[in-house]
Image (cartoon, rainbow, N blue to C red):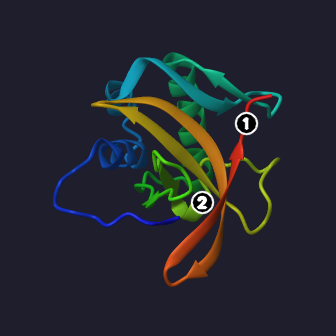
Amino acid sequence: MASIIKTGEKTIITELAEAISAYNLAEVSDLLSDNGEFAIQNDKDDIVLTNKVNFLDWLRGCTNELLIDSKSRQRLEYTIIQCLHSVTGNPIIIFDNGKFPDFSNNQEQNEKSGLVIKLDDNKITGIELCFLVMKTENPFIYEKRCIRPG
């Protein structure tokens, strides 16, 4: 995997990253497909696929936890990387150096959590969860471990 080269053009991935980093769930909702499948971690710490409404509820809970813990409303920092291991090359968004969202029950110490984004035209049709381990810093190369439902 390598870093995405940023251009002057704003992509739907950048819009999603900015909306999540600003805790703007209304904008996140506008970017997600109504028929999409989105991964979340449920109350039992299992990864499950769900619909848009449940994903937004889960994301709201993640951001509320973060805001309570940090007692500030600072924007989350994010990095967008491009997966080079698949034909589609789905982008991955990493927030706060892989600390958000927190999957502490499944995450190893050197891993960063990330959101794998699937899109079709102008809507995000799916989000998967993954962990990334940096293999080299120059160029940035990560090893991805997907977290699958069930």
Q: In the drawing, does residue 109 fall left or right of residue 141?
A: right
Q: Nearer the viewer, residue 13 or 90?
A: 90
Disc 2 packing (10 Å; few <14; some 14–19; many ≥20) = many
Q: x%, y% of residue 22?
A: 37, 46
Q: Is residue 24 above or below residue 50?
A: below
Q: Secondary structure at mark 2?
A: helix
Residue 98: mark: 2
Q: x%, y% of residue 119?
A: 40, 34
Q: x%, y% of residue 14?
A: 32, 50
Q: In the drawing, does residue 42 fall left or right of residue 31?
A: right
The residue drawn where x is 60% and y is 60% is 98
Q: Nearer the viewer, residue 118 or 101?
A: 118
Q: Secondary structure at mark 1?
A: loop
Q: Quadrant of residue 13?
A: top left
Q: x%, y% of residue 84?
A: 50, 59
Residue 61: mark: none
Q: Are marks 2 and 1 in contact (CB under 8 Å)?
A: no
The kind of residue tagged 1 is Arg
Residue under label 1: 148
Residue that extends furthest to the front in the rendered view of this protein: 87
Q: In the drawing, does residue 102 fall left or right of residue 20?
A: right
The residue drawn where x is 78% and y is 66% is 109
Q: Quadrant of residue 135?
A: bottom right
The residue drawn where x is 67% and y is 49% is 102
Q: Is residue 132 above or below residue 11?
A: below
Q: In the drawing, does residue 142 fall left or right of residue 75?
A: right
State the count of labels.
2
Residue that extends furthest to the bottom in the rendered view of this protein: 138
